Image (spheres, rainbow, N blue to C red):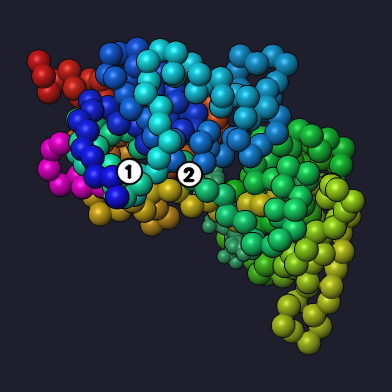
Amino acid sequence: MNNQTERVRCLIIGSGPAGYTAAIYAARANMNPVLYEGLQPGGQLTTTTEVENFPGYPEGVTGPVLMDDLRRQAARVGADIRPGVATRTDFSTAPLKVWIDGSTLIEAETVIIATGATARYLGLPDESKYAGSGVSACATCDGFFYRGRNVAVVGGGDTAAEEAIYLAGIAKKVYLIVRRDQLRASKIMAERVQRNPNIEILWKHQTIGLFGDGVVEGAILVKNRGEADEEEVRIAIDGFFLAIGHTPNSDFVADYIERDAAGYIITQPGTSKTNVPGVFACGDVQDPHYRQAITSAGSGCIAAIDAERYLAEKYC
Ligand code: NDP
């Protein structure tokens, strides 16, 4: 094991739009940021195809190209971008301590957490088989490509309701696949879904597979699983959207940083400040609501400015 210790002014953990934007701002503020990219360099956007809603790309851009652009921009202004995963933290005393890959210890004056969230999947082999070919976990990102087509959304929470309503404005028909006989979504969202003529709710249905020649052409469902009248149902769809929740990647700071019941880092309203002075959070790891590349990027900018002001106040 390679045990090294390094002292930095600003450590950024995570390489989605939030992390890279924080790096751009921190580098330009002479904070000499060191950014560790984590398990999935570029974050969730590297798994999407076309991105048409990130301002500044009138012709659209693919997720991987967008992330590479942000990465190169951060590197060009001086961010030190490295491979590595933050595995452990100790925020009990200054300097803030973060271990990378279980060995390198970074002692930081400020830490910006931008580790994102991971969309939950059902765990079906077909989800990987058709990844990028009809399976998506983000209706706002990919819904546009299903104009006039039939799609399905899995889930019964607010995200599923929101995505079904969004897709209902684009697609020909939306099936909402709900595993129970009721929605978890808030009453107002549930009513909106139920009133929408383009949405058909498939109550007590569970997905067991997808089919199609190279791309999704349909889903195989089981209705009333485990009951006497259990039956297999096939629906013809071109898009299969997962909306069964996200898991924020925040476990590695759980001992020190306040999180909500779902694991999202709690920040002081209107800021990126966590409960630990000098530790800031941005992007999806602290945002259960918007989860867009542009809102993540904006919050990364906020985190870098908060970190810069924290350092300025500490040393003036
Ligand atoms: P939730 O955890 O609230 O809901 C997840 C949904 O997915 C539930 O209906 C759950 O079913 C279903 N589900 C989970 N696992 C499976 C599975 N294996 N198979 C089939 N269905 C499954 O997650 P959300 O992302 O919807 O919401 C997260 C939080 O964000 C919530 O607090 C929500 O209120 C909030 N939010 C608020 C919004 C707003 O205010 N506009 C918009 C979006 C989110 P079951 O009900 O049976 O457990």
Q: In the rendering, at what x and y percent does residue 5 appear?
A: 21, 38
Q: Residue furthest left?
A: 316
Horizontally, is 303 left or right of 189 in the view? Answer: left
Q: What residue is shown at x 44% (from left), y 13% (from top)? A: 76
| Residue receiving disc 1 | 100
Q: Which residues are magenta?
A: 89-95
Q: In the rendering, at what x and y percent does residue 54 appear?
A: 61, 22
Observer-nearest of 82 and 131:
82
Quarter assignment of residue 10: top left
In whole angstroms, how far apart are the C-alphas of marks 2 and 1? Answer: 11 Å
Which amino acid, mark 1?
Ile
Q: In the rendering, at what x and y percent does residue 216 appear?
A: 83, 50
Label 1: which secondary element: strand
Whether residue 310 is situated above or below residue 57 in the rendered picture: below
Per the picture, the main secondary structure of the magenta-coloured stretch is loop
Whether residue 199 is situated above or below residue 310 in the rendered picture: below
For ligand 1, tell me if the residue under mark 2 lies within 8 Å: no
Observer-nearest of 297 and 129:
129
Q: What residue is shown at x 80% (from left), y 80% (from top)? A: 230
Residue count near mark 2 (Cα–Cα under 10 Å), binned few <14, some 14–19, many ≥20: some
On whether residue 228 falls in the magenta region, the answer is no
Q: What residue is shown at x 24% (from left), y 45% (from top)? A: 3
Observer-nearest of 2 and 246:
2
| Residue receiving disc 2 | 39
Q: What residue is shown at x 28% (from left), y 45% (from top)? A: 2
